[in-house]
Amino acid sequence: MNNKLRTGEVEHLFDAMLVLKEKEDYYKFFEDVCTINELLSMAQRYEVAKMLREGKTYLDIAKATGASTATISRVNRSLHYGADGYELVFQRLGFEDKSERS
């Protein structure tokens, strides 16, 4: 993990998230913490990651999500060279890896 992320403030945020139990709790919390655009951007990046993992093309992803090719490229870089956070979530959700990436 990037050491720049390991701040007291980030730790407090993650601790706060750990106490949320229901999906409705997350809606309330993130509505207060994020702007609508910030939350929608995070959701878009997550959808892009799922579609990349499924082996979809940039063109298909851009059409389906409205994401720019720059955003798709950034997410792709995270999938290949990031901290494996997406993969951790996908595995815990039981998503099958349908892409041809190694």
Image (cartoon, helix red, strand yellow):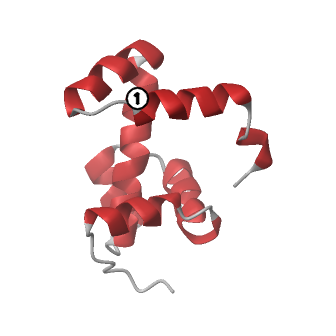
Depth check: give the residue in front, 63 or 76: 76
Quadrant assignment, res 6: top right
Badge 1 crowding class, 10 Å Cα cut-off, few under 14, some 14 to 19, many 20 or more, is some
Task: Locate the N terminus by quadrant.
Answer: bottom right
Which residue: 27% across, 70% down? 95
Where 25 sits versus 95, above or below?
A: above
- Which residue is farthest top? 32
**Residue wearing tag 1:** 39
Give the image location of residue 57, x and y in percent: 37, 69
Image-based side of 5 in relation to 89, left or right: right
Q: Viewed as shown, does residue 86 lie left or right of 84?
A: left
**Three-letter code for the amino acid on which mark 1 is drawn:** Leu
Expressed as whole percent of the image width and height from the top left, the position of residue 29 reads: 37, 20
| Above or below: residue 22 compared with residue 61 | above
**Where residue 38 sits: x, y (%)?**
46, 26
The answer to which of 16 and 1 lies nearer the viewer is: 16
- In the image, residue 70 above or below residue 57: above
Residue at the spot x=71%, y=28% of the render? Answer: 8
Point out residue 51 in the picture as x, y percentages from the top left corner: 33, 63
The residue drawn where x is 44% and y is 64% is 88
Quarter-wise, where is residue 78 in the image? bottom right
